[in-house]
Amino acid sequence: MEIDLHDMGSMDPTSLLSSGMSEDEPLSGVIGKARFDKLAKQFDTLGVPTEILESLQPWMAAMTLEQLQLVKLGFDPNSGVEMQLQAHADADNKPITGLETITEQLGLLSGLSKADQIKFLDLTLEEMQEAKGQTSSLLKAWRAGDAPKLASMLSEEYGAAPGLYATLISDRNRRWVPEIEKLLKADKNYMVVVGTLHIVGRNGLLDLLKADGFSARQLP
């Protein structure tokens, strides 16, 4: 998997939280009053106190908003694909390893430039305007295995932010490919589980593996 979810349980919650906290200026000073007011309004709509916002980094504010919106739409964080597969793997005594660590993942997000963090927040705020319809369309395409549709939907929002896309998706894909190729050449069967955006589209894992001579077949 992208990360071994068991690592989450062994990580100090304080350390996890502090990675997304700002030690410098308040969030409103980083993103500007107009954007901050728009963000606060969204949090208020979701029934969450806005007092915590000032202490967050832009990327953490964006991810928190996204997660809260998904919960409001009826999605249970504990029922995600990774959580379910982890439960099955644990029940079958199958080991799980991560393509990266939670510390590396958090460092990647907190290491984004302020400009990219703000762009990330802007994209999230834009999604809130049509979150229900967009999430429904995305889920429908995912269930149908419609790779072209998924590629179009998932990459469209990053078109105006190529630097952000490269950091969060493309660069990580390139780091993962050598490890995945080792698994493909091994004498055991492995299941690789990553977010859809890492699989489809330009510079997706399938494209990178194809360039290295591997072929893929989508199962019905």
Image (cartoon, grey):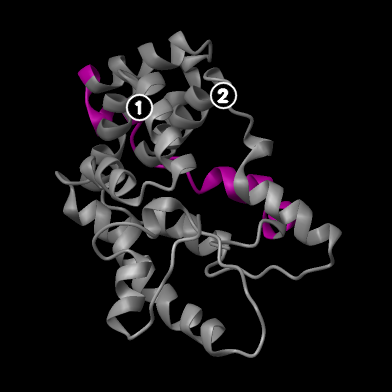
What residue is rendered at 29% in x and 15% in y? Answer: 37
- Dot 2 or dot 1: first in sequence order is 2
Q: Nearer the viewer, residue 113 or 213?
A: 213
Q: Nearer the viewer, residue 16 or 165?
A: 165
The residue under the point 69% across, 54% down is: 85
Task: Kindly identify which residue carries mark 1.
Answer: 134
- x and y percent of residue 207 in the render? 30, 70
Can you say whether 107 is above or below 152 in the image?
Answer: below
Q: Position of residue 214 (x, y in %)?
A: 38, 82
Main SS of the magenta part reads helix
**Residue 92: mark in rendering:** none
Is residue 145 in the magenta section? no
Label 2 element class: helix
Compare residues 151 and 114 and report the one nearer the observer: 151
The quarter holding residue 10 reads bottom right
Q: Which mark is residue 71?
A: 2
| Category of crowding for the residue at label 2, using alpha-carbon neighbours closer than 10 angstroms: few (below 14), some (14–19), many (at least 20) | few
Q: Residue at x 44, y 38 (%)?
A: 60
**Amino acid of disc 2:** Val
Indicate the amino acid at tag 1.
Answer: Gln
Residue 207 is left or right of residue 85, and the answer is left
* Above or below 44: residue 168: below
Tag in front: 2 or 1 = 1
Q: CA distance from mark 2 to mark 1?
A: 15 Å
Callout 2–callout 1 Cβ contact below 8 Å: no
Extent of the magenta region: 7-34
Give the x, y percent position of residue 80. 62, 41
Which residue extends farthest left?
Answer: 160
Secondary element at tag 1 = helix
Point out residue 120 in the picture as x, y percentages from the top left corner.
29, 40
